[in-house]
Structures are given as C-alpha cells and as structure tokens.
Amino acid sequence: MKRWAILVAALYCLMLAVLTVPVIALAATDLDFKKAASAYAQWFYWALLLVMMLGQWALLAVPARFASRRPVTRRSLLPTVLASGLMMGGLAAGAVGAIAEFARFDILDQNGWSLLGVMTLTWCLWSLIFFRLGRKENPSDFISRQSRTLLKGSILELLIAVPTHIAVRQRNECCAGILTFIGLATGISVMLFSFGPAVFFLFVARWRRLHPEAAGAGESA
C-alpha cells in the first residue's frame, strides 16, 4: 500500500509540474510559454514543488496505514494534521494577498511578513482543529473530512482569486496580478492536493480486484 501512496504523491507532483507553464502563461505572461517556462530554472519553484509533494505524502500516510490494516496512532496523525493545516494556511494567505492587491494595499511591505503571519496563524489554527477532529473520528472518516474541507477551502479561495485577478490585470500597472496569480496557483494546487486520498483508495480498490488472493491474505493477517 505504501507504494501506491508514493505513486499518488508522484502523480500529484507531476501534475503540478506539467500545469505550471500553461497556468503561468495564461495568468501572468499573456500566453508567452517560453517566458513561463523560465519557472523551471528557479530553485524556489522546485523547493515549493518538493514541499507540496511531501505534504501530499503526509496526507496519504494515514490512508496507507489504514488500507494496510496497520494501527493508526495519534503520533501517526501528526504529519497529516500539519500538512493539511499548512495547505489551509496557504489558502488563507492566497486569499488575503489577492484581496489586498485588488484593494491596492501594499501587503508585501517589510518583505511580506504580513502574509507570512497570516499563513502561520491559519496553519496553527487549522492544525489544532484537525488534531481535535482526529481525536474524535476514526481514521477513514477523519481523512475524508479533511479532504472535503481542503476542497471547499480551495474552491472558496479560487472564488476570490479568479475575479480579483481578472480585475487587476486590466490595470496599466507594472507587475499587476502577482498576488492574485499566487492565489490562483495556491487554490489549484490545494484542490488537486485534496483529491489524493480518493485517488489512493481507487488504486487500492483496483489492486484488490486484480489480486483477490493477496488482498484476502493481507486481511486475514
């Protein structure tokens, strides 16, 4: 089951890498794909991609243990809780940044500490919320609820980022649309992120149909 989780995390990383150039070209460079592809040459881009992949793996850790019939402890829930809280923090920062740019408020003063503060506070708050939920619900229900919350949060954030991005791109300003674009990228990334457990269980169900004897032996063990 761990191999299926690794496969899902790798596919998620691949989707982000493939979607990067079209999304940047559409949202920030007026369909200049060559200019958009320069993102691949930036170490910061690959660092963010690695963080997202590790977060997806953390979200899949509990479903992998659950599907393998292994016990799920409070300690094993911690990486999943922190990863999901981080994604909610990113959504909050993306939404606040988009609104601030639309309102012409310079939230990037002092090297962006305001946005970082919003993200950190939201990360801590949602990590606490998810941790308390994990204490009350069984692992499968907990992961499903986490995924639904992340999906709803990403949709809400995109409902803010999309119209504000369209509005600020109409302005004759240098670099207009950077924060709203970050909001778009964050919303799409977290939306795909939330599908991870569902895709993983589809893989597991398919494997069990193809290998009923092995699945039965695993369950009996």
Image (cartoon, grey):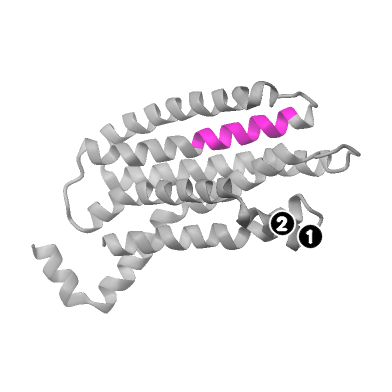
Tell me whether the residue at label 1 lies in contact with that at label 2, contact meaning CB atoms closer than 8 angstroms: yes
Q: Is residue 199 visible?
A: no
Label 1 sits on a secondary structure element that is loop
Q: Residue 117, how many percent across, how many down?
A: 55, 23
Query: Which residue has dot 2 on it?
Result: 36
Query: Which residue has dot 1 on it?
Result: 32
Q: Residue 124, how many percent across, how many down?
A: 43, 26
Q: Which of these two is toward me, 81 or 42?
A: 42
> Circle 2: is it few (<14), some (14-19), or many (20+) Cα within 10 Å?
many
The residue positioned farthest toward the right in the image shown: 172
Vertical relation: 163 (above or below) 192: above
The quadrant holding residue 186 is top right
For image coordinates 26% across by 42% down, the residue present is 138
> Circle 1: is it few (<14), some (14-19), or many (20+) Cα within 10 Å?
some
Asked if the stretch drawn in magenta spans residue 117, the answer is no
Q: Which of these two is toward me, 101 or 116?
A: 116
Q: Which residues are magenta?
A: 88-100
The quadrant holding residue 22 is bottom right
For image coordinates 78% across by 32% down, the residue present is 102
The quadrant holding residue 38 is bottom right
